[in-house]
Amino acid sequence: MRNSRIKQVKQLLAEIEENIPKKDFKNEHVSKSTIGWQLDHALKVVNGVCKMLEASDPKTYTSNFNLTRTVMFTFGYFPRGKGKSPKVVLPPDVITSENLLNQLALAKTNLEKIKSLPKTSHFEHFLFGDLTKKQTVRFIEIHTKHHLKIVRDMLK
């Protein structure tokens, strides 16, 4: 697997870290949530997806064509306001800088761990189907960029 995607995700994590001090900022013209909500959610997705990838059985992976995944992964874009987050990745009512920093440290560790996983380690996404390790890293990249773009727009 090319490590350039992992490097890209690490750069996105650095941007998340830069925005932690602004966690309480809110711009209702862009989103009903705070910056902290966006950061927390993005980190929960990185960590949750990495854990599922790590726990997967590479022998059970089945290749599947998914038009929605192909289009969104090609363009590297998720439309706003269309997705529904599973409860497990929803942020708590109170988001602390300490918790965000802990999740950030875990995300960095998890990204290192998945480098050595087999190519057919996989994550089952409710919309995109079974994603290989490579596709999963791409999903993490696009998803994190999506939430950081919302943060950037909130700060404009």
Image (tube, rainbow, N blue to C red):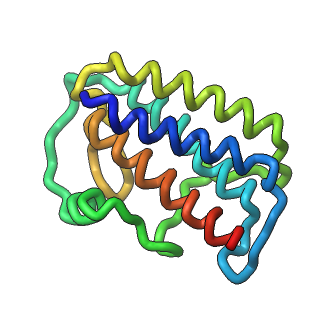
Is 66 above or below relative to 119?
Answer: below
Q: Where is residue 29 in the image (x, y as percent from the top left)?
A: 70, 83
Is 115 above or below relative to 46?
Answer: above
Residue at x 76%, y 63% (from the top left corner)? 34
Numbered label tally = 0
Residue at x 68%, y 41% (from the top left corner)? 17
Residue at x 46%, y 32% (from the top left corner)? 50
Q: Position of residue 10 (x, y in %)?
A: 50, 35
Is 36 above or below relative to 101?
Answer: below
Quadrant of the frame with the C terminus? bottom right
Q: Position of residue 37 (x, y in %)?
A: 71, 56
Q: Which of 91 and 6 is in front in this view?
A: 6
Is 156 above or below relative to 96?
Answer: below
Q: Position of residue 105 (x, y in %)?
A: 65, 27
Identify the image quadrant of residue 1.
top left
Identify the image quadrant of residue 138.
top left
Q: Report the residue that reaches farthest toward the bottom.
A: 29
Left or right, residue 123 beside residue 17: left
Left or right, residue 109 beside residue 126: right
